[in-house]
Amino acid sequence: MIRDITLGQYYQADSVIHKLDPRVKLVATLCFIISLFVVDSWVGYVAAAVFLAVMIRLSKVPFRFMVKGMKAIVFILLITVVFNLFLTPGEPLVTVWKFTITEEGLRIAVMMAVRLSFLIVGSSLMTLTTTPNSLTDAMEKLMGPLKYLKVPVHEVAMMMSIALRFIPILLEETDKIMKAQIARGADFESGNLIKKAKAMVPLLVPLFISAFRRANDLAMAMEARCYRGGEHRTKMKPLRYHAADRVAYCVLLLYFAGCVAIRVWL
Amino acid sequence: MSLILDHVNYVYGEDTALAVHALKDVNLVIPDGQFIGLIGHTGSGKSTLVQHLNGLIKPTSGAIYYNGEDIHEKDYDKKKLRSKVGLVFQYPEHQLFEIDVFKDVCFGPKNLGLSQKEAELRAYAALKQVGIEDEYFYQSPFDLSGGQKRRVAIAGVLAMKPEILVLDEPTAGLDPKGRDEILDQIAKLKEETGITVILVSHSMEDVAKYVERIIVMNHGSVLYDDAPKEVFRHYKELEQVGLAAPQVTYIMQALAKKGMPVDTSATTVEEAVQEILRKMPQKKILKEKA
């Protein structure tokens, strides 16, 4: 059940998208997210959907992996839809008791649902096709100029890559501890909210301890290899743009320009 | 009173590209009071198998019966099953969480709905069974040594008074002394209480000394299921699946090859010594003694 969160889980495949420079994918994801908020017409959303569908197709990642990521946000999605549906003032469409669904409400609710789900699918696509390590490499490189403003770019990137790397490990650990406590008769499912919260103690205490232990071990291992932060640190495989990356930037530019055009003229 | 696995199959991540067939048609009968070694290389499916025994994992196909009842029937009491089939996970010390040792061991019996007094009595008995002294009872479990932590964790399962005790690699990460202590304690416990014990390990050496039956797992299926002597006869096949027979088996085989008429089925060093002494030409022994 906790394995449903796909964010930060890499799907191995041999595709054009996988081979792209992670910087391209990062910029593209950002642009895609922005474009979702730029467009506000159905034509725009169709364009975004087509763009997303083509990218998913190119990535060779099975579509159900994207949908898996959606499961985690179903709740947020529902709340958003319900609130927008009932609380937007405007032309009333249907009235049930005290609740009124307005035309504007329906429009905004659907739009928000589409936006949110595209956003999640879009960013899942990035994390599914890019290893966390290359993703943080890209971030470090893209934010490089901030170094002159005394922002510890390398350290932040390192922290992020470690955090991402630990998500699956901690999930696995949670699963293991949960099973071990169930084997000792623990019950995580029944009872009211307070009982359920109390039942989490045997899970959370060992989990925190294990997280700290892992952090300690990792810090030790890094220091043993003389890690001293980003100063004068070089890369074994520095990021370089290739022809495919330039083409990708062009495609992205076209798409983004298209979105802006749709917003302005339609 | 027994545990029966009937054509059990298990697939991890079914319907995905990453599906792994972890168990393939496993059939086992585990009668009362046996001391069983479950052996297999990393990834052979032994950990998956033991999680089936107390219903933590539901088989993809096949059934598991405890005392003649299907444990995945809708109204089967899983909690009761888990108290009867006690499962000690790998690195069980990672599951400790209470503020002192005694309270942690009480966790299991209390979950069974026992009274405070009954739970404490059981916890006390369990801690004694694993050889934890009274002075440690009110210490934080996190202040204990690795071997002690592990024993406390094992006591946590024992306090539920299981009829079948399953230990998944109870010696992993312990030094040779800690390993022998834990294994001796388990053997003693087995002798005193007569419960069924299933010892999961990847080391034949660990298991050979104690168990009466060995189940060898390979790629998710049962390769051998027999008395240790019989299993070690296949030492060449065992090597092929990344396991090895105890070292004495190799010595006895080598001696037999050299022409010494020894029985090659000795499984422990003591047995081997007896056998070699028996078959050694008497004159030689006398000469050496002189």
Image (spheres, coloured by chain):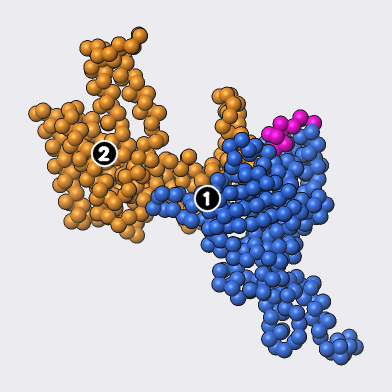
Pick whichever, A165 or A116, lies toward us: A116
Label 1 sits on residue = B61
- Furthest-top residue in this view: A98
Which residue is situated farthest in the front direction here? B68
Q: Is residue A202 left or right of residue A234?
A: right
Residue at x 60% of width, y 29% of height: A198
Q: Colour of chain A?
A: orange
Q: Quadrant of residue A157?
A: top left
Check the rendered structure and report the hue given to chain B.
blue
Q: Identify the magenta region.
A: B108-117
Three-letter code, disc 2: Leu
Image location of residue B137, percent across then percent down: 77, 40
- What residue is shown with label 2? A30
Q: Counting other residues with Cα less than 10 Å from the Cα at mark 1, is it few (<14), some (14-19), or many (20 or more)?
A: some
Residue at image coords 42%, 53%: B18
Q: Nearer the viewer, mark 1 or mark 2?
A: 1
Q: Position of residue B57 (x, y in %)?
A: 56, 46
**Residue B122 got which mark?**
none
Looking at the image, can residue A218 be seen?
no
Residue at screen point 32% across, 55% down: A13
Q: Position of residue B202 (x, y in %)?
A: 62, 62
Any part of residue A15 in sight: yes
- The correct choice, above or below, for B21 with respect to B271 in the image is above
Q: Chain of mark 2?
A: A
Is residue B112 in the magenta section?
A: yes
Task: Answer few, some or many: residues within 10 Å of disc 2's Cα (few below 14, many 20 plus, some between 14 and 19).
Answer: some
